[in-house]
Image (cartoon, coloured by chain):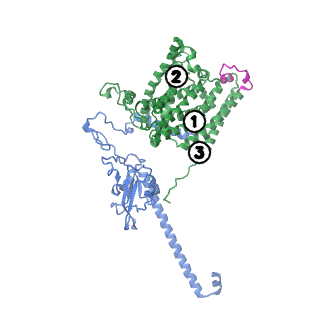
Chain colours: A blue, B green
């Protein structure tokens, strides 16, 4: 049995480490200090960092391994629309709590990365001003087509169009996903491969069983045609 | 009323009205700074000495921030919603501040100037000081609901309703854990309770006292609406709860009242469990007891801030379940344990005790060390096992998430 209330102390140790560490390690402090800069070197809006000489800017796409912000759509190859994983099943659209996803299904099917004809989203919009980053769309997706992106600097001067991310803005390659969330992406790929292997093994087994059955049937038929009465009775 | 009495009353109260609001200003700065550092930010660091430009040189770690905040609050527009009940909307912040300020008098802090005044104006010498403390802090609930109701705003009303449910529920374990101390001292007089712990006889060092202190502290967090029990003002759910419709100086009064209540309840915790002004060097230098008292209050407030930076907010059902299914049975059990322990220690001597002296100290004199050690370990064990069992029983049942459309 773990110590009662031990989780609280564990959490307090984490915050204490942050508190003390922020005084000793400069790279812990993520905020930039603009206060006494001349006005022409101030950012015009968030996300646009002015660079002074010798100033290191952070790469905002790879903040940490575990940051999750808004969903993105995955594709496997170099041509996004030829290898998109999404088949426009609209489960995420219906499951989304704030209803920020809008999908329009294509009218005709197209071959996907696996060479199978599938529907694809003609439209896939996410309103990031409504999205609450709950990740439920990721949980429910049966095709591993939607995952979380860690990009957070989405501020824009256009508050309507700029905050509505279209399908083509959301499409990101699997390589990009591996780049921002290596552990999660590797685990997901492994699971997909395993599921695929299991499916194929099942298919193979089924095919094998069918073949065997057919063989036995053929054999039985052949024996029946030979016409020994005992066996015929047994078969009945 | 004689002139001397008026003078004594002023001497007893006015310094408190100056000291604690000053400490409040410092605490807001401390809280913002500590929370920022916990989140790897810098926190306020610009406002320094007033009327100097280039604040960077005189910024003093942003210590001028509370003053700037105060000036801002004073000059902000006082907005009252059109449909609000104007009278009660005005009265609520005042009523929130008054009880908080009032109970500061019940803290037995030996300020140097307080020795020269007559005992009758020292509130903490009152024979029912602890009862009075709880009675007056209970008024705070009324102020909060008044604010929620008078604002005529659904978020305010929700915050007020939550506050009532929470404060009424947590008042009970709060008072029941204070009962332990009253049992060990045999008095409700705050000064006598503090004196009974002189030296290192703090009640937190007894098993039932430790359990009572933990229950008291948790309940105190809930009473003062501190995180993780800040449901009445949960920003992410109901905007600002009961003070959604307050602005300017009325908002500042609420804010002040909340922090003063924090000081008051921490002060009571220090009086009841942490030895009051007791500490090293007090015997030689009596004025040190004031320092020790304030240091202990600030230690408790630092823990409150630390917890605020660590724990997420509870759900409403978890909050109520925790009070009624965990804290309440545990504090009642704790009273039984403390009572049986005192009885076992006494071994038939209870009737012959001196009423003027603290009960526990009289019982400890001449007690068998082996019996004491056995009692201590046994009580700790029972309390721990009981807490674990209650935890298992009171835990909310967790179901996996159900999806509507996905398989």
Q: Residue furthest top?
A: B3
Report which residue position mark 1 lands on: B168
What label does residue B357 carry, if any? none
Q: Nearer the viewer, residue A41 or B238?
A: B238
- Secondary structure at badge 1 equals helix
Q: Residue A115 in the image: state x and y as whole percent.
A: 39, 67
Q: What range is drawn magenta here?
A: B346-363
> Could you tell whether B231 is left or right of B369 in the image?
left
Q: Give the residue drawn at x 63%, y 83%.
A: A231
User: Nearest the camera: A99 or B161?
Assistant: B161
Q: Residue at x 65, y 24 (%)?
A: B186
**Quadrant of the drawing holding the N terminus of chain B:** top right
Q: Are marks 1 and 3 on the same chain?
A: yes
The residue tagged 2 is: B292
Residue B132 versus residue A41 in the image, above or below: above
In the rendered structure, does residue B357 fall within the stretch colored magenta? Answer: yes
Residue B198: x and y in percent read 59, 21
Tell me how far mark 1 sits from mark 3, CA to CA: 21 Å
Left or right: residue B15 compared with residue A103: right
Question: Splitting the image into 4 quarters, where does residue B368 fall?
Answer: top right
């Amino acid at each position: 049995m773990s110590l009662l209330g031990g989780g609280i102390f564990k959490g307090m140790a984490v915050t204490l480490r942050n508190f003390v560490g922020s005084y000793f390690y400069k790279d812990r402090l993520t905020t930039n200090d603009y206060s006494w800069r001349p006005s022409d070197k101030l950012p015009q809006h968030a996300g646009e960092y002015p660079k002074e000489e010798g100033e290191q800017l952070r790469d905002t796409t790879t903040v940490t391994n575990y940051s999750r912000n808004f969903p993105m759509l995955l594709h496997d190859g170099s041509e996004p629309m030829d290898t998109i994983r999404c088949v426009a099943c609209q489960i995420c659209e219906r499951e989304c709590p704030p209803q920020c996803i809008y999908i329009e299904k294509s009218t005709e099917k197209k071959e996907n990365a696996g060479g199978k004809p599938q529907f694809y989203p003609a439209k896939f919009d996410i309103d990031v001003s409504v999205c609450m980053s709950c990740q439920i769309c990721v949980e429910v997706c049966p095709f591993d087509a939607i995952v979380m992106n860690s990009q957070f600097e989405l501020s824009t001067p256009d508050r309507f169009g700029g905050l509505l991310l279209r399908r083509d803005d959301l499409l990101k390659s699997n390589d990009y996903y591996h780049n921002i969330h290596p552990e999660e992406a590797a685990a997901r790929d492994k699971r997909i491969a395993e599921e695929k292997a299991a499916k194929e093994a099942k298919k193979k087994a089924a095919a094998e069983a069918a073949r065997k059955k057919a063989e036995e049937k053929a054999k039985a038929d052949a024996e029946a045609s030979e016409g020994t009465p005992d066996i015929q009775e047994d078969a009945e | 009323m004689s002139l001397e009495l008026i003078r004594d009353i002023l001497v007893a109260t006015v310094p408190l009205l100056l000291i604690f609001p000053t400490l409040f200003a410092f605490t807001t700065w401390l809280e913002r700074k500590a929370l920022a550092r916990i989140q790897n930010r810098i926190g306020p660091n610009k406002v320094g000495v007033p009327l100097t430009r280039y604040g960077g040189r005189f910024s003093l770690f942003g210590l001028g921030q509370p003053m700037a905040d105060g000036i801002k609050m004073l000059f902000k527009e006082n907005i009252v919603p059109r449909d609000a009940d104007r009278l009660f909307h005005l009265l609520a912040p005042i009523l929130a501040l008054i009880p908080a300020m009032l109970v500061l008098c019940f803290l037995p802090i030996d300020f140097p100037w307080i020795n020269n005044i007559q005992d009758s104006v020292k509130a903490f010498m009152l024979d029912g000081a602890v009862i009075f403390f709880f009675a007056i802090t209970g008024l705070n609930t009324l102020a909060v609901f008044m604010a929620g109701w008078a604002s005529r705003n659904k978020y305010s009303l929700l915050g007020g309703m939550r506050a009532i449910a929470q404060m009424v529920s947590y008042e009970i374990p709060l008072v029941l854990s204070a009962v332990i101390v009253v049992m060990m001292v045999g008095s409700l007089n705050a000064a006598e309770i503090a004196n009974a712990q002189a030296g290192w006889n703090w009640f937190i060092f007894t098993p039932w006292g430790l359990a009572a202190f933990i229950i008291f502290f948790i309940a105190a967090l809930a009473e003062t609406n501190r995180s993780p029990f800040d449901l009445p003002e949960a920003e992410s759910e109901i905007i600002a709860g009961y003070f959604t419709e307050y602005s300017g100086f009325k908002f500042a009064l609420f804010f002040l009242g909340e922090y003063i209540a924090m000081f008051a309840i921490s002060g009571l915790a220090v009086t009841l469990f942490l030895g009051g002004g007791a500490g090293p060097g007090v015997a030689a230098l009596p004025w040190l007891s004031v320092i020790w008292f304030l240091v202990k209050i600030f230690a408790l407030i630092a823990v409150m801030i630390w917890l605020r930076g660590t724990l997420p907010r509870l759900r409403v059902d978890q909050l109520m379940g925790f009070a009624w299914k965990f804290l309440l049975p545990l504090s009642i059990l704790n009273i039984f344990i403390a009572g049986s322990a005192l009885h076992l220690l006494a071994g038939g001597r209870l009737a012959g005790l001196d009423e003027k002296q603290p009960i526990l100290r009289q019982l400890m004199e001449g007690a068998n060390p082996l019996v004491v050690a056995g009692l201590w370990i046994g009580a700790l064990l029972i309390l721990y096992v009981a807490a674990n069992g209650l935890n298992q029983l009171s835990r909310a049942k967790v179901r996996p998430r159900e999806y509507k459309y996905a398989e």
